[in-house]
Image: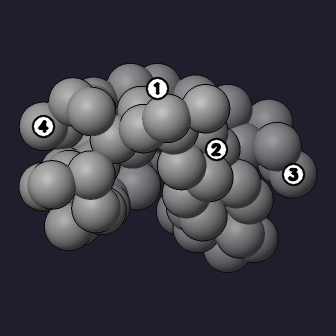
Amino acid sequence: MDGVEDVEVECPYCGEIFGTLSDTCYGSIDTVEDCSVCCRPIRIRMTFSGGELVSIDAQPA
């Protein structure tokens, strides 16, 4: 899977870390995803440059 990376996200509610798949071909991604541990919605913002993760921000949605 070219350009797809498993990114670890820390849940802002329960503090657990879970993985999510992201396409690194985009410059940035802004999405809402449920925590795989506590099931609460999280707004995840990721920035990529040259196929590498530059920044990640996870906030309550």
- Mark 3: give few (<14), some (14-19) or many (20+) Cα within 10 Å: few
Residue in view at x 80 percent, y 36 percent: 39
Which residue in the structure is indicated by mark 1? Answer: 32
Q: CA distance from mark 3 to mark 1?
A: 15 Å
The amino acid type, in three-letter code, at marker 3 is Val
Residue in view at x 21 percent, y 30 percent: 26
Q: Nearer the viewer, mark 1 or mark 4?
A: 4
Which residue in the structure is indicated by mark 3? Answer: 37
Which residue in the structure is indicated by mark 4? Answer: 27
The amino acid type, in three-letter code, at marker 1 is Val
Instruction: Give the mark, 1 or 4, whose residue is nearer the N terminus.
Output: 4
Q: Does residue 61 show up?
A: no
The quadrant of the image that shows the C terminus is: top left
Q: Does residue 57 show up?
A: yes
**Residue at disc 1, secondary structure:** strand
Q: Nearer the viewer, mark 1 or mark 2?
A: 2
Query: Is the residue under label 1 in contact with that under label 3 (CB below 8 Å)?
Result: no
- Mark 4: give few (<14), some (14-19) or many (20+) Cα within 10 Å: some
Which residue in the structure is indicated by mark 2? Answer: 20
Q: CA distance from mark 2 to mark 4?
A: 17 Å
The amino acid type, in three-letter code, at marker 4 is Gly
Please state which of residues 24 and 20 is positioned toward the viewer in this rendering: 24
